[in-house]
Image (cartoon, rainbow, N blue to C red):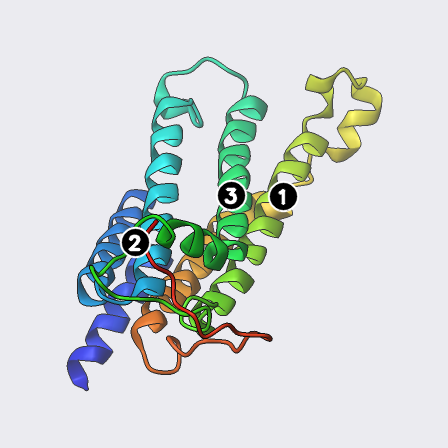
Amino acid sequence: MIYLFLILISVAYITLIGDFAQISLLYMVSIIGIMFIKARETTVLHLCAGLLAFKSLELTALFIVPTNALSGSTLPYIWLNTNNYLIHLIFDICVLFFLFYRPPISRVYLRRFVFPKGKQHTDQELTYSQAEAWLIGVMFLYFFVDLAALTENFIRNMDYLGVSDDIAQYFWNWNLVYHLYTPAKNVLNLLELLAIWLSVSPKGGKKIRRKNTKKAGYKPA
């Protein structure tokens, strides 16, 4: 029990205090670890594979697109911040859609491939897990935080959008979301990791019942 407590404390410290690189590394190591632990559970395996793919693409986009002055870009801060918030927002939406449609995606995939080999999968087995429902809630919070930050960024810098300084100056000090953005995202990072980890627990892995469940399994085409 003491080891579990120490692990949780370490994870909480990294996600709440650590930098983006440390948090991303912890996220990807956690996902890969769960994939090895639950390699024979289709729902968890597909969930983790999708999350890992989206996180890899998001990190690649953040590496390629200039998002801060440290990248050496001479773009005004409004456009650097816009790139940063927009990349996060786009991937929030992509992950949300993936989570919503993960069961049907799994079913379509398994009509062509069966993994583990020779195993049949029922609709009930491939429905949402409780952990996925929690994860959807966390992703909605990500979406609203990134959307609020992007909106405030435009409002605070309206002079770059062609609005006269006489009007724009009243909004130059709108920076509440800007200052709260990193702490809020760090808390959400911790909640997301906990939701992902709960997918391997009995309660988190419990399937949410779906109506009109078919008992027939899928066979490879």
Q: Quadrant of the N terminus?
A: bottom left
Q: CA distance from mark 2 to mark 1?
A: 22 Å
| Residue for point 68% across, 30% down | 154
Mark 2 and mark 3 in contact (Cβ < 8 Å)? no
N-terminal of the pair, mark 2 or mark 1, is 2
Q: Residues within 10 Å of mark 3 (few under 14, many from 20)?
A: few
Point out the frontmost of discs 3 and 2. Answer: 3
- Residue named by callout 1: 147
- Residue closer to the observer: 130 or 7: 130
Q: Residues within 10 Å of mark 1 (few under 14, many from 20)?
A: some
Which amino acid type is shown beneath numbered disc 2? Tyr
- Is disc 3 placed on a helix, strand or loop? helix
Q: Position of residue 88 (x, y in %)?
A: 49, 40
N-terminal of the pair, mark 3 or mark 2, is 2
Which amino acid type is shown beneath numbered disc 3? Cys
Q: CA distance from mark 3 to mark 2?
A: 17 Å
Q: Position of residue 64 (x, y in %)?
A: 36, 23
Side of 35 relative to 107 (left or right): left
- Residue named by callout 3: 94
* Image quadrant assignment for residue 32: bottom left
Q: Residue furthest right?
A: 166
- Is disc 1 placed on a helix, strand or loop? helix
| Residue for point 30% across, 59% down | 45
Instruction: Give the answer, above or below, for where 157 lies relative to 8.
Output: above
| Residue for point 54% across, 18% down | 76
- Residue named by callout 2: 27
Q: Position of residue 71 (x, y in %)?
A: 36, 22
Point out the frontmost of discs 1 and 3. Answer: 3
Q: CA distance from mark 1 to mark 3?
A: 14 Å
